[in-house]
């Protein structure tokens, strides 16, 4: 952070880093404990999964709107709105779950209220990440911009590790499993105070627009941000480019690849908490199940970061190679997870699958981006964001339904998506495409 002090002082960069970090960490912490809460309240697994689907749907629907509003209403104001949405959602969800666990509310009523309060995160929380990215891009010199954006974006990925890791520490005696939500609400309040206190809402030095961040999930891909001030300075007299269509043959194969792999990853994340409770026989001991789920999700997040921050920069695979190898590793990891009977096997399988998806997702994104010229980058970015977000709306719930029918049906379908992606992608993502040289 100190190296960026010429444009943005280190203390302000720390605040921006914290805004992104807390949004991802709080959501993934909730993911790690919610299956255990559902088991304790005797809520059907699929309803637990649908609570996250509702939040993801709102995130996908509202994120583009908030990205546009940050240019009109100010970046600091939108950051504050996102943090307030996160803080209130965590606090109210935590109180609702505490009331249900304490017996003050019926189980069904508890989850209905919980889902309503989750809408505050999905609907308002998506305002913060693009505002942070735009704030940084508009106040850093061009030669510093990539480094600065990478720093704030990395906090989103780091949050997916920190959330599941520390959530079990906040399962406190009085509030029990709702403790992590209440603690993260308090952390959100601290971040909001620091944001108001340390971050001035000054006039931007450059034109910039923040990238729409993907819905944060444990073992998901770190948010990426790219901004080029030149992209926002468009000649108003120039004719509007022809809109990029989903059926465009340049991007069609990449969009299908993102669809196949995205469904498998979303199902994997939706099912893993329930698999841990069943395979380790922890449904009678939900508190212990939450701790074990946190360990597995943290291992997956570390594997994802290893692939994206280590293997890809080191090996520099082509986009096609990253997609195919990632899908193959994902299929292998899913099969291992599906047949594992102890914690060690589940951790190994889930981490291997997460490593694969950590290669697949940047490869898919890069392949789609490199398949079209510069003028279509905005359109293809919107398409990839839609593909990434849509996977988390219904696929986790479908995965849980199939898992409850038979675990190997669910994991067979996930591995089947990945296996089909390898076989189909070998020819569909052609070797002769010059645009697929590096993710």
Image (cartoon, grey):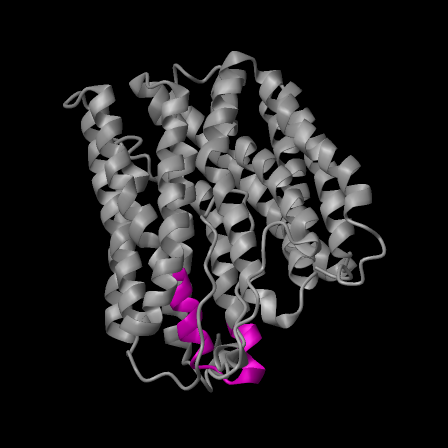
User: What is the chief secondary structure element of the magenta stretch?
Assistant: helix
Would you say 226 lies left or right of 251 here? left
Magenta-drawn stretch contains 142: yes
Q: Nearer the viewer, residue 70 or 309?
A: 70
**Measured from the top left, where is residue 362 in percent x and y?**
64, 54
Assign the C terminus to one quadrant of the image: bottom right
Q: Please state which of residues 292 and 245 is positioned toward the viewer in this rendering.
A: 245
Q: Is residue 400 above or below residue 51?
A: above
- Find residue 308 and report its horizontal and vertical position in percent: 64, 54
Q: Is residue 367 magenta?
A: no
Q: How many marks?
A: 0
Residue depicted at x 37% and y 66%:
68
> Residue at the spot x=26%, y=52% of the render?
85
Relative to residue 281, is residue 181 depicted above or below? below
User: Which residue appears at 69% of the width and 34% of the height?
Assistant: 418
Q: Closer to the camera, 293 or 335? A: 335
Residue 377's x, y, as percent? 59, 66
The residue segment tinted magenta is 129-148
């Amino acid at each position: 952070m100190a190296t960026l002090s010429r444009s943005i002082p280190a203390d302000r960069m720390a605040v921006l880093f914290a805004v992104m970090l807390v949004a991802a960490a709080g959501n993934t912490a909730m993911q790690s404990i919610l299956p255990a809460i559902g088991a304790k309240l005797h809520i059907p697994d699929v309803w637990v999964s649908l609570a996250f689907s509702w939040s993801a749907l709102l995130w996908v629907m509202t994120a583009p709107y908030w990205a546009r509003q940050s240019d009109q209403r100010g970046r600091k104001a939108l950051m504050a709105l996102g943090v307030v949405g996160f803080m209130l959602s965590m606090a109210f969800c935590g109180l609702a779950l505490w009331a249900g666990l304490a017996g003050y509310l019926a189980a069904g009523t508890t989850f209905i209220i919980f889902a309503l309060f989750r809408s505050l995160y999905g609907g308002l929380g998506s305002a913060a990440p693009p505002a942070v990215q735009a704030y940084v891009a508009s106040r850093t010199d061009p030669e510093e911009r990539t480094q600065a954006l990478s720093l704030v974006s990395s906090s989103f990925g780091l949050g997916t590790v920190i959330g599941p890791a520390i959530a079990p520490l906040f399962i406190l005696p009085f509030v029990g499993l709702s403790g992590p939500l209440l603690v993260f609400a308090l952390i959100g309040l601290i971040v909001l105070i620091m944001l108001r206190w340390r971050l001035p809402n000054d006039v931007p030095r450059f034109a910039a627009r923040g990238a729409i961040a993907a819905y944060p999930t444990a073992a998901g891909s770190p948010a990426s941000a790219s901004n080029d001030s030149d992209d926002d300075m468009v000649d108003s007299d120039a004719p509007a480019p022809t809109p990029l269509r989903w059926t465009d043959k340049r991007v069609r194969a990449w969009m299908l690849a993102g669809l196949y792999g995205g469904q498998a990853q979303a199902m994997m994340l939706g099912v893993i908490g329930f698999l841990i409770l069943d395979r380790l026989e922890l449904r009678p001991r939900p508190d212990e199940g939450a701790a074990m789920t946190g360990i597995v999700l943290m291992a997956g997040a570390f594997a994802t970061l290893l692939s994206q921050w280590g293997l890809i920069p080191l090996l520099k695979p082509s986009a096609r190679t990253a997609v195919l190898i990632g899908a193959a590793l994902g299929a292998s990891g899913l099969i291992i997870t599906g047949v594992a009977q102890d914690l060690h096997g589940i951790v190994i399988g889930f981490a291997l699958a997460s490593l694969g998806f950590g290669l697949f997702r940047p490869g898919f994104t890069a392949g789609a981006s490199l398949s079209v010229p510069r003028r279509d980058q905005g359109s293809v970015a919107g398409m990839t964001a839609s593909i990434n977000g849509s996977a988390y709306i219904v696929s986790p719930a479908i995965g849980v339904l199939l898992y409850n029918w038979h675990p190997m049906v669910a994991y067979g379908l996930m591995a089947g998506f990945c296996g089909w992606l390898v076989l189909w992608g070998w020819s569909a993502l052609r070797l002769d495409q010059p645009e697929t040289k590096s993710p």
